Image (cartoon, rainbow, N blue to C red):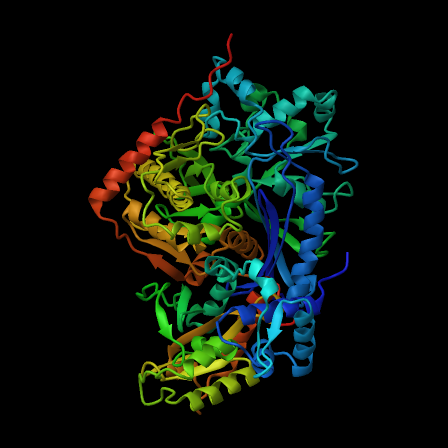
Amino acid sequence: MTERYVMSIDQGTTSTRCILFDHGGRLVSVTQREHRQHFPRPGWVEHDATEIWRNLERIAPEALAQAGVGPEQVAAVGIANQRETTVLWDRRTGVPVTPSIVWQDTRTDALVDELSRRPDAHIVEERCGLPLATYFSAPSIRWLLDHTPGLRERAERGEVLFGTMESWLIWNLTGGPDGGVHVTDVTNASRTLLMDIRALAWDDTLLDFFGVPRAMLPEIRPSAETYGVARRVVPGVRIAAALGDQQAALFGQTCFARGEAKCTYGTGSFLLLNTGTEPVRSTHGLLTTVGYQIGDQPAAYALEGSIAITGALVQWFRDRLGLIGTAPEIETLARTVDDNGGCYIVPAFSGLFAPHWRSEARGIIVGLTSYITKGHLARAVLEATGWQTREVVDAMNADSGLDLTTLKVDGGMTANNLLMQFIADVLDVPVVRPMVAETVSLGAAYAAGLAVGYWPDLEGLRRNWHRAAQWLPAMEPGRREEEYDNWQRAVQRTFDWIKPPKE
Amino acid sequence: MPGPVQSIERAAAILRVLAQGSGRLGLSEIANSLGLARGTAHGILRTLQMVGFVEQDEATGKYQLGAALLHLGTSYLDVNELRSRAINWADALASRSGEAVRIGTCLQGKVLVVHHVFRPDDSLQTLDVGVLLPMHATALGKVLLAYDANAAAAMQNGELEQFSRRTIRTPKELARALAGVREVGWAAEIEEITIGQASVAGPIRGYGGLVVGAIGISGAVERICDAQGRPRPDFVTYVRDAARAVSRDLGASRW
């Protein structure tokens, strides 16, 4: 039987998608299912890992049916996943022992504060390349171990397993309680705060620092390598890749050479720059992270500019303010006016990520006058994504010593022409969208296909990349300066809003 | 929970067709727009008439929206929403055919380009989203006209601009071409607007089969057409598959 397709699973923050790609990297079928977002308290965000697994059990066969093929025609499965979200489950029953703590959750605020005051706190950034923040997995694991009676003992005995979403799905696909493989990949492991970024191994000092028992951790493996064979959902198919979603997009955009960068526009937005086989330390608020590792080759590292709220601002505009019916309508509304009317929105909903890293900042709308209409607000919503991109690009240029000459973009928001034009305008470089906007899924498929020999090498993948659209800068430089200055002044006004608790 | 009721989807589509212009439409025009049998369309129209959503002119027998609808807003598919829903399939179409892809909707007697995917050869190309194209001289336009009786009726009066020797000249010729489009379910244009260029397009349908846009490829005539000067069958299949995939995403079940 010929293996005609590679299956990609994108387990994202709001939904899980399953896509089949053909040999040309072209999309053949797509299925998707959203899962519930639980907000039990202000600042808490939880997912039900069982619901996510059930969704996958449903959409994967649907994707095969849509293409009219069976699992025997699938060469491999690759997984891309929302990063950092923490799942703890019972090794014997396969049932999650707590709700999953999502990367946006800020409940570990006080814990992170306390940990960062320890005299040995500097080792965290030195060893793993990331600042100590609520965003990453280790504080969430620690919080769950501290707040669930008996959990730490069970974790020490190896009865409770930790994983990010890819670990959870691979474990279930390969049999669950009945022989499931407990692994993670280097990119996901690099987001836990527990891995030595040079050695690509769990670091005992960091495990001690956070009080996380080694027995609960998955084995760290390369991003592209056969981890095992599926026994459920797609029986007999090799599971051959896992990458954090942003790293998967870097791979899908074929940014295989040092100096190549992409930005993915989704709920949040993430600019990643391939820095080659050496990790680069940022002095401008960027993260050092692993880009990917193919088999036993050396890992490729990346600098990352993480923006927490971009598409999520449009969703807020739709769901909380009700000013539009669907997300794409933001463009229609924004086009009812010619400019922002002097209005700026800084969406520091859970503080600001790169390059500011201000957890005490909160969102603002400034420049309100009686002139402002909902059209101006819609403009300001889109412009917020443009200016936040400009801030991380500036940081990236400063850290790498290179000047970005074009920006490769992907993700759902690239369907928004007004936004893409605005990004080209404020960056003053061309913005290019590749033929497959679903680069997260494509990257996971590429990595899996590469691991099983469905695609021969990186060069072959590169030849699949084609430009689908390009936006050229057209903003007058004086106006760009003026608007950027206004934006930066707006950002300043979000700082220091949340007051430290009284002693 | 029971599934959607097909006759209600169709009734909604008929109302949208009637809402799209100021003119009144006859039974066959409505049936043709939606690809429905005359009997089916007639049954639905009679029901809509009973509930006051549709009125029939006694003298001409043509249908128009009823008074009961005056209080209901009409909403069309937002073009940005259409682009968003179609983007993956448009990419796949460009990639399979090796040609540029455009999606168009009807705007004041022209085709408004709402989405454009470059020909995947990485040559220098310029986005032409927002550009207006003539209806009668493009494959996109012919598809839109074929399934929009009001727009087609409007073309019967105006002058048809000539772009080349092969541009459709008369309203009669146009009507014949549109009937052909409805018969096969896709449209082609060969050197009718630009010498050396050809295009193929198919309808994007929403709920009930209402045509909300057209998707098509365009490029050099020697690539788009075979030795006999007809559109290559594999390209026609790619276009129709893409049109169907987008339609399915938009909720059109039959296509």
Examine the rendering and report whether any part of residue A421 can be seen.
yes
Q: Number of callouts in the render?
A: 0
**A154 versus B108 height, above or below:** above
**A405 versus B97 height, above or below:** above
Residue A24: image x %, image y %? 50, 65
Residue A33: image x %, image y %? 64, 51
- Name the residue nearer the viewer: B90 or A219: B90
Query: Taking A356 as reference, is B47 left or right?
Result: right
* Residue A161: quadrant of the picture: top right
* Residue A392: quadrant of the picture: top left
Query: Taking B195 as reference, is B253 left or right?
Result: right
Query: Taking A451 as reference, is A308 left or right?
Result: left
Query: Taking A130 as reference, is B126 left or right?
Result: left
- Hey, which residue is sitting farthest front in the picture? B59
- Name the residue nearer the viewer: B102 or B111: B111
Residue B55: image x %, image y %? 61, 73
- Hey, which residue is sitting farthest left in the picture? A478
Residue at screen point 36% across, 26% down: A493
Image quadrant containing the N terminus of chain B = bottom right
